[in-house]
Image (cartoon, rainbow, N blue to C red):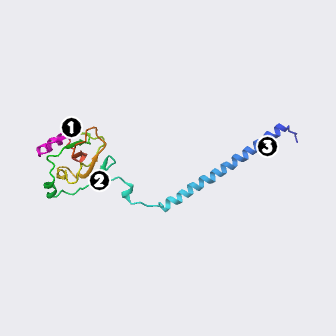
Amino acid sequence: MKKQSPVGLFFGILLRAVVVIFGLAIIAFGIFFLSKVIGDGIKANNGPVTTLPDSVLTDVEGRDDLIYNTAEPDTQEPDTEAQEASPSHDKNILVLNSTNTTGLAGRWCDRLREQGYANVEAADYSDTQTSTRIIAVEDGVGKDLVPYFNGATYEVGIVTQGTNADVSGKDIVIIIGTNDDDGQ
C-alpha cells in the first residue's frame, strides 16, 4: 500500500465525509418529500378539515367594499306607502355609469327628468357592475326609483369610492349596471 502524506490523508477523509453528508441529506430530503406528497394526498382525499358555507367563500354579486352599508339590499318592489311617504322627485340624485357605453348616465338622467326628477346629474363609476344599485343616504328615499331598472337593488349607505364626482349633498346615488345598458 502506498503511503500518503498527512495533507493527502486529511483531504481524502474530508472528501469521504462530504460525500457521506451529501448522501444522508439527499436521503433525508427524499423521505421528507415523499411524506409531504403522500400526506397531502391523504388529506385531499378526506376532504377539508373545516367546512364553511358557500356564502362565506363567495362574493355576492353587486356588493363591494366601495359602499359603507347601513342596511341590507332590498330587491323587492317598493310598496305604494313608501313611495308616497318619501318621493324622490325633489331629492339630489347622482347617476353613475359603470358600463363601457359612453353617455349612458346622461341618457338615464334625461329619462328620470322626464319622470319628474329635477335634480339629476351624471358621472362615471370606475368598476363595472352587472345590476343597477340605488344607494340612498336614508331608508325609504329612492325606493320609488327601483321599478325603472332591471333587477336593481336598493341600499342605504354612502358611496365613498369609485367616482371622481362630488357625492356630498347627494340624497341618492344610482350606479347603472350592464343590465340597464340601452346599447346606444
Image position of 9 (left or right of 174): right
Quarter of the image that includes the C terminus: top left
What residue is drawn where x is 19% and y is 53%? 143
Disc 3 crowd, CA 10 A, few/some/many (<14, 14-19, 20+): few
Is label 3 in a helix, a strand or a loop?
helix
Q: Nearer the viewer, mark 3 or mark 1?
A: 1
| Front-most of residues 118 and 10 | 118
Task: Say if 117 sits above or below 60 in the image.
Answer: above
> What is the C-alpha distance between the residues marked 2 and 3?
76 Å
- Per the image, the residue denoted by label 1 is 103
Residue at left offset 63%, top offset 54%: 31
In the image, residue 107 lies in the stretch drawn in magenta: yes
**According to the image, label 2 marks what residue?**
70
Disc 2 versus disc 1: nearer the observer: 2
SS label for mark 1: loop
> Residue type at mark 3?
Ile
Kindly identify which residue carries mark 3. Answer: 13
Query: Residue 38 location in percent, x, y?
Result: 56, 57
Of 159 and 15, the residue lying toward us: 159
Tell me which label, 3 or 1, sits earlier in the chain.
Answer: 3
Amino acid at the residue labelled 2:
Thr
Which range is magenta?
101-122
Residue 21 falls inside the magenta stretch: no
Mark 2 Cα shell of 10 Å, populated few (<14), some (14-19), many (≥20): few
Q: Is residue 148 visible?
A: yes
